[in-house]
Image (spheres, rainbow, N blue to C red):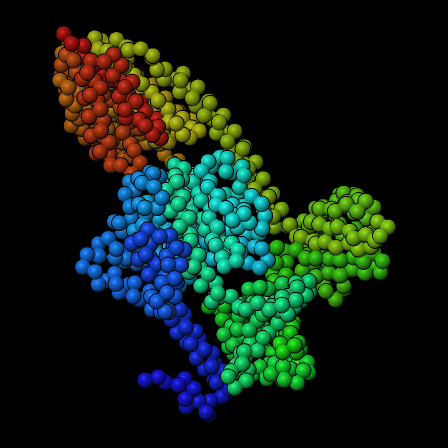
Amino acid sequence: MKTDPMAGADDASPEVLALAKVVARLRAEVAELEGLAATTAVLERAKGVLMARDGLSADAADEALSAAAALRGRTLMEECWIVLGGIRSRPHPAKAAPAAPLAVGAAPPPEAGPVSGPGHPATGGGDAPFRGLLASLAASLAGARSPQDTAGILRAALRVPLGVEGVMIYRLDGAGRLGLIGHAGIDAVLAAQWQDVPPVSGVAAVEVIASGEPRWLQDPERDAEDYQLIGPPQRWPTRAWLPVPGEERVSGAIGFLRTVPDPFDAAHRALLVRAVRLCGGSLRVLERHGDGPGDEEVAAVQKIFDVLSGAAILLSPLRSPTGEVEDYRIEAAAPESVDVAGRRGKELVGRRVLETYPTIAGTPLWHGYLDALETGSAYEGEPFSYREVVAGIPETSLYSVRATRLAGRLVVSWIRHDAGAREASRLAAVQRLGNLGWANWSLTTDTVNWSEQVYEIFDRPPEQGPMTLEELPRHLVPDDLPALAEAVRRLLGEGAPIDQPFRITTDSGVRHLRIVAEAETDAFGDPVEVHGFFQDLSRQRDAELALRESERAVLVQRGVLKAERAIAARLQHALLPVPEQSVELVGLRVDIAYMPSDSGVNVGGDWYSAIELPDGSALFVVGDVAGHGLDAVGTMAQLRFTAKGMIITGSALPDAMARLNTLLLHTGAGVPSAATATMIMARYWPAERRLAWVRAGHLPPLLVRGGEARFLPPPEGILLGASADSVYAQETLELEPGDHLLLYTDGLIEVPEESMDRGLGRLAEAAAEAMGGGTEEPLARLLAQLRPAGRDDVCVLDIRVPPC
């Protein structure tokens, strides 16, 4: 049951009736398109059957169907259905049955021919190996509803056998330009760049259409010299451009872009030629449906429009069977014609008024069009507002429209009143955001015009009017007057543009300004008008001065720190010399290493001491003072010499550590940032091979014995300078021949965002490997393994008991 879309609409408003007619017409066009597509599909499938069964080309199959229909007195569609029905009735359709339509994006069917892969020649001659592929392609193209579908079908069918990754379809318009009407495998940005191609040399598609001969581009370097290649040459090393045959001449070109570097062989070229011939029919059907009928009068009007300024279009009335005007179609448009959605010039051609601007149905403008068309009198309506949603945002504009009849059509022109206001609003926003304003000086009339922002820049009330050129120097800082005067002399005397900074004094202080201006001259070269702009650069200037002052302070501070580092490093080197070779001490071999941090400008407070005592024993100390710089070096020196002196004078290790704690507490009394330090102190008696040691918050010594590494259990003792009640206990250890005892500071194991336990474990593993292998430089190798970051100073003592 069919429903009349106009039924029950007797009481509807004219606006609703007009829109209902548009909807009904669009439905009829959709039905017509569906019928046309179905008819074309039957024809193309029948052609595909003949191509696969009899080995015919696409054109030969078309001629064979037409000849058979004429010979038997049938219509072409009847002959096509008979061919298709006969194939389906055979018991063994494997050889002759048409292949199923190839969906866009699907791979070619197995019967596409014995092609081993992209770039490999097919076996056999002609297009025999590709008959199945061509049949499937013909069937698939029958279902194409647009050139975009055609491009996708071609890419899907040719991607595997030929390595085609990109397809581009160009159509030649009446002006000789190429328009990209379909593409596949091409990104949107590249497609937009090559959407419209003018008829210039050096474009393969243009040459193909002009000559009617294919272009095979197979050498990227040489091709880049002869043609403007689409995309990088390395992306598609081989390309083919083939002409699309039209009814009378070449109407377009199809490009096949391959990722295969091998040249096109004869079989592949023949396949592409036949594939393009298959596309020619479907593309011509789509073009015939999409193109409007040609009209010499319309073409003549368009030529006039092309040289006009302003907005103007030519409307053709579209009438119902009863003669009523149902809509208008835009037949021609001037280049400066722009609608509320931003469509411009020829983008408007072909559009229908009610489809594009539905809300004007039934309005005074619509009735004015009808009156002008019927009576021939010009219509000039009152300004009206039109509202349209563009990209989800409502846009309302005010228009004045004029319509005049021209040989059964309407010439419509309009003025958009709000365009100037919008531009003025945007200009004002730019001036405000950029803190600049424009100014004009007429030298013939001695008048000056300022924009509102210039009054803000000069801190001048608008009611006082703009400042004359003679008045301007009185507001300048005297030091800037000569330079600005010279710039104005060049502007007015030589006509040279100027860009000059200067300063003015205002009630709010000195402002840094900039003037950019140029002069317009008369026929004799004399300046008659100056126009330019002023810009307030005070904020930028203040920021530059602050930055410059900050840079100067940074440089001074850097110099101070550099000098302090040099002094501290020199003092540290004098107090703490590091021997380059192993030291023999009371029968022990001692290796010492000190490595400063790689970052920062201050030296650290890591230190060591390794001396022989008067009684024949040896003292070993490793410490780490908190902080850097001269203060840390001074504290280090104080602890080093005090510890040595107390042990030499007979103090026990725990007593010496307690007195050092008292020393730091006394030294830091009343100081906001009192010094603290960690330290480990050991005394070795060679006759007994006994080692006694104490610690103050320091990491435990590492003992490497027999290829295994273990940390000594730490005795009680917190860091120096932390508490007056600190207690320091002593532990003893008997060393054995071949033992290594490692005393070190925390820079050897600390890694950002890593636990201390993990760092100690890594140290034990590395020490066991480095010191158990009998190498000559175990300490150097150990440091190379464990200190990749170099964020802190490192001091290490490797105490080795020689093997017996």
Residue 437 can be seen in this image: yes
As drawn, is 312 to the left or to the right of 184? right
State the image coordinates of residue 608 (x, y, percent, origin top left): 31, 20
State the image coordinates of residue 528 (x, y, percent, origin top left): 82, 55
Residue that sits furthest to the front in the current view: 71
Residue at the spot x=24%, y=31% of the render? 759
Quarter containing the C terminus: top left
How many numbered dots are placed on residues in this image? 0
- Work out whether residue 694 or residue 387 is closer to the camera in this orientation and state it: 387
621 versus 443 height, above or below: above
Residue at the spot x=35%, y=52% of the render? 56
705 versus 53 height, above or below: above
Residue that sits furthest to the bottom in the current view: 11
As drawn, is 168 to the left or to the right of 664? right
Residue 459 can be seen in this image: no
State the image coordinates of residue 598 (x, y, percent, origin top left): 39, 27
The image quarter containing residue 29 is bottom left
804 versus 709 height, above or below: above
